[in-house]
Image (cartoon, rainbow, N blue to C red):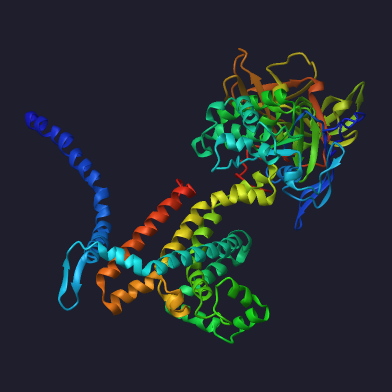
């Protein structure tokens, strides 16, 4: 009896903790599994397809074969270089405008809105209740020839200034660089404003009191305290604006002209109308790599090791 | 009685902080009521009071973070009432420390120097860090420091600017007891070393008495009494001060006459004596007060050396260096007696005793006040960042 008891007793001691520890080590991987599967099926696999497609030759009728035809990249870039640089330029402009409009807006909501805070936040998000397409179409109406906005620009001769800067064509606002950048800025403004608001709202106002106490004027206090502490939001906002704006093809299509074609529009056309899959895939890849490189450089320079 | 005036006859020095008829109201609530106060240059001054007494509001008005409803703030001859916080030669050690989380410790300390365009900011800041004995933390971030270390950095960041007045807003409130005791001594050392005017706001009477040269006890927006710690403790002028600073036994009585230098007070048929200078109400009803540690318990007769009352011991609690007794007097009032554990045999509840004390240890206060004013508020913790 005692022998049995002794024989059994060590069992739980040595046996049970080990499986518990093993399953403890497994838990993080189990939790990662759904996400990894999702990524594999909807990101990694399509990426591999895209990469493969960009190196294939052939036609729709005869089928495509993987021939490692790198020349497609060279040809595509040569043909669409202007649209490429234009996209980056427009996206950068929209991002800068987004910061100029979004930062004061987020600041006002975070610190000055008082009881209107929630109402204003809902108003920032409200455009999402209608579709991207409808919102962009609305800008056609806003900027339409002989509309009030155009009339105002004409009356104040701002239109001449914009013409001089090459932002518009002739006496109208539609189908111009100006219209496309306006559309991009508008459509991505909430993505700029919300992360900025989130990080500004966390800035402890007592720090600004302390800065004032230490001889910093309100403006210096903003520059030395509020601005650095809102950097994570600023970086997140600019990324969330710049990246989708680079690949956008709706704004340039609906508000622009053939002179404002962006790379997203080209890829869209190559895939769905010209049916030149390798060129479309090659352009997609170049765009992606360019964005990754630009973002990596930007994040590194912005010095956001405390990001997230 | 309230707003005890300053020791007069002393000329205002260049750097004295003067508050003149300072008033602050929030809606219908008067936080600070017509306050007059002069804080001499180089002194360690404590504003002591329960939460909501207006001490933090007073401090914030001196710092420029709150605009007075009426009155003026002077430093020397300069009226700074309407100047912005960043224009004042005043720095604050905040209760929350408010260290800048994105800057290193040395950058935090340099902040004020840089804003004023000083040279050699790094060296000056390092000297301040040495003063608080933390130069080795210069390159850390505030988030990596303990509460006590953050407290010292907050002090260094303010002191490095050599302000005319350094304000300390409950600076030790977030520290544990042992660290608090240590920092009290440390703060006093630093104040003596740098010779700046420290204005220290606290609700902790022991903290105020340990550090300050002069204490102003504030209650309900006015100063109840002002003086050095011993003076406030030995000769309180109001029941609030008597109860808020330490403990007091207050007995109801009436002035019946005088006996030489002493006033005779009748307390329920017992004649007690108190020096005339220690009596705030020359005639009529008074509260006769005496501190618990000034009382001596004698069993049996004993020689009559001063005032005495007889009663029954109802409770004895041993606290190590001393024993606290409750003695019930003839009219059912219990008084507290603290006896040193000097070897005399302990008393048991139920024992008949006589309580004696010297006349010069008593004090008499006007009976128009609440005998319980200022009780049970001194230990109240002020929530971090609270602005009454």
Of residues A110 and A181, which is closer to you in this image? A181
Splitting the image into 4 quarters, where does residue A61 fall?
A: bottom left
Q: Is residue B273 left or right of residue B203?
A: right
Q: Position of residue A169 (x, y in %)?
A: 54, 79
Of residues B266 and B109, which is closer to you in this image? B109
Q: Position of residue B250 (x, y in %)?
A: 75, 33
Splitting the image into 4 quarters, where does residue A19 fall?
A: top left
Q: Is residue B64 above or below residue B246?
A: below
Q: Position of residue B228 (x, y in %)?
A: 78, 27
Residue lying at 57% horizontally and 23% vertically, measured from the top left:
B318
Q: Is residue A116 above or below residue A204?
A: below
Residue lying at 54% horizontally and 43% vertically, measured from the top left:
B102
Q: Position of residue B302 (x, y in %)?
A: 73, 14
Task: Inspect this view and state whether residue B54 appears.
Answer: no
Q: Is residue A246 left or right of residue A5?
A: right
Please identify the quadrant where the N terminus of chain B is shown.
top right
Task: Inspect this view and state whether residue B171 appears.
Answer: yes
Splitting the image into 4 quarters, where does residue B345 fall?
A: top right
Number of numbered discs visible in the structure rendering? 0
Residue lying at 42% horizontally and 74% vertically, measured from the top left:
A261
């Amino acid at each position: 009896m005692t022998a049995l008891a002794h024989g059994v007793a060590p069992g739980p001691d040595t046996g049970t903790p080990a499986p518990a520890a093993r399953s403890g080590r497994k838990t993080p991987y189990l939790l990662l599994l759904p996400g990894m599967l999702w990524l594999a099926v909807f990101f990694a696999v399509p990426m591999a397809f895209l990469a493969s497609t960009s190196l294939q030759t052939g036609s729709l009728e005869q089928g495509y074969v993987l021939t490692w035809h790198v020349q497609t990249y060279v040809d595509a870039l040569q043909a669409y270089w202007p649209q490429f640089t234009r996209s980056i330029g427009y996206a950068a402009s929209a991002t800068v405008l987004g910061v100029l409009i979004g930062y004061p807006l987020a600041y006002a909501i975070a610190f000055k809105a008082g009881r209107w805070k929630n109402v204003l936040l809902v108003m920032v998000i409200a455009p999402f209740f209608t579709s991207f397409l409808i919102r962009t179409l609305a800008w056609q109406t806003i900027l339409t020839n002989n509309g009030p906005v155009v009339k105002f620009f004409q009356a104040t001769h701002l239109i001449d200034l914009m013409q001089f800067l090459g932002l518009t064509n002739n006496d109208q606002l539609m189908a111009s660089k100006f219209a496309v950048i306006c559309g991009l800025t508008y459509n991505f403004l909430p993505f700029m404003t919300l992360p900025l608001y989130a990080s500004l709202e966390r800035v402890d106002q007592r720090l600004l009191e302390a800065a004032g106490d230490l001889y910093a004027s309100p403006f210096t206090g903003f520059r030395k305290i509020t601005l650095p502490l809102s950097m994570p939001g600023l970086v997140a906002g600019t990324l969330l604006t710049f990246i989708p704006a680079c690949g956008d093809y709706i704004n340039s299509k609906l508000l622009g002209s053939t002179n404002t074609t962006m790379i997203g529009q080209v890829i869209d056309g190559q895939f769905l109308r010209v049916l030149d899959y390798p060129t479309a895939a090659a352009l997609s890849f170049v765009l992606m790599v360019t964005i990754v490189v630009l973002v990596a450089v930007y994040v590194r320079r912005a010095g956001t090791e405390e990001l997230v | 009685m309230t707003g005890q005036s300053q020791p007069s006859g002393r000329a205002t020095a260049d750097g004295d902080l003067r508050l003149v008829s300072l008033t602050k109201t929030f809606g219908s609530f008067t936080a600070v009521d017509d306050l007059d106060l002069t804080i001499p240059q180089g002194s360690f001054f404590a504003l002591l009071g329960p939460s909501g007494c207006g001490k933090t509001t007073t401090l914030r008005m001196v710092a420029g973070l709150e605009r007075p409803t009426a009155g003026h703030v002077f430093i020397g001859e300069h009226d700074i009432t309407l100047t912005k916080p960043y224009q004042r030669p005043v720095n604050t050690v905040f209760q929350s420390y408010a260290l800048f989380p994105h800057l290193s410790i040395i950058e935090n300390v340099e902040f004020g120097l840089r804003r004023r365009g000083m040279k050699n900011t790094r060296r000056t800041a390092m000297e301040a860090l040495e003063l608080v004995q933390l130069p080795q933390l210069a390159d850390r971030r505030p988030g990596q420091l303990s509460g006590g270390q953050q407290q010292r950095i907050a002090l260094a960041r303010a002191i490095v600017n050599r302000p005319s007045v350094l304000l300390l807003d409950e600076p030790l409130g977030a520290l544990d007891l042992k660290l608090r005791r240590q920092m009290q001594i440390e703060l006093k050392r630093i104040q003596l070393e740098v010779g700046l005017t420290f204005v220290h706001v606290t609700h902790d009477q022991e903290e105020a008495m340990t550090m300050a040269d002069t204490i102003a006890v504030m209650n309900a927006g006015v100063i109840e009494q002002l003086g050095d710690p011993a003076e406030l403790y030995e000769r309180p002028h109001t029941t609030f001060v008597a109860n808020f600073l330490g403990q007091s036994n207050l007995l109801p009585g009436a002035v019946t006459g005088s006996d030489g230098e002493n006033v005779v007070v009748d307390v329920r048929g017992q004649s007690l004596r108190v020096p005339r200078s220690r009596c705030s109400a020359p005639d009529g009803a008074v509260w006769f007060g005496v501190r618990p540690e000034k009382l001596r318990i004698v069993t049996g007769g004993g020689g009559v050396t001063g005032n005495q009352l007889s009663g029954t011991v109802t409770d004895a609690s041993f606290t190590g260096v001393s024993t606290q007794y409750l003695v019930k007097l003839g009219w059912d009032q219990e008084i507290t007696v603290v006896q040193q554990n000097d070897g005399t045999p302990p008393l048991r509840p139920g024992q008949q005793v006589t309580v004696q004390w010297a006349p010069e240890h008593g004090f008499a206060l006007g009976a128009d006040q609440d005998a319980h004013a200022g009780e049970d508020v001194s230990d109240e913790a002020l929530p971090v960042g609270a602005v009454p």
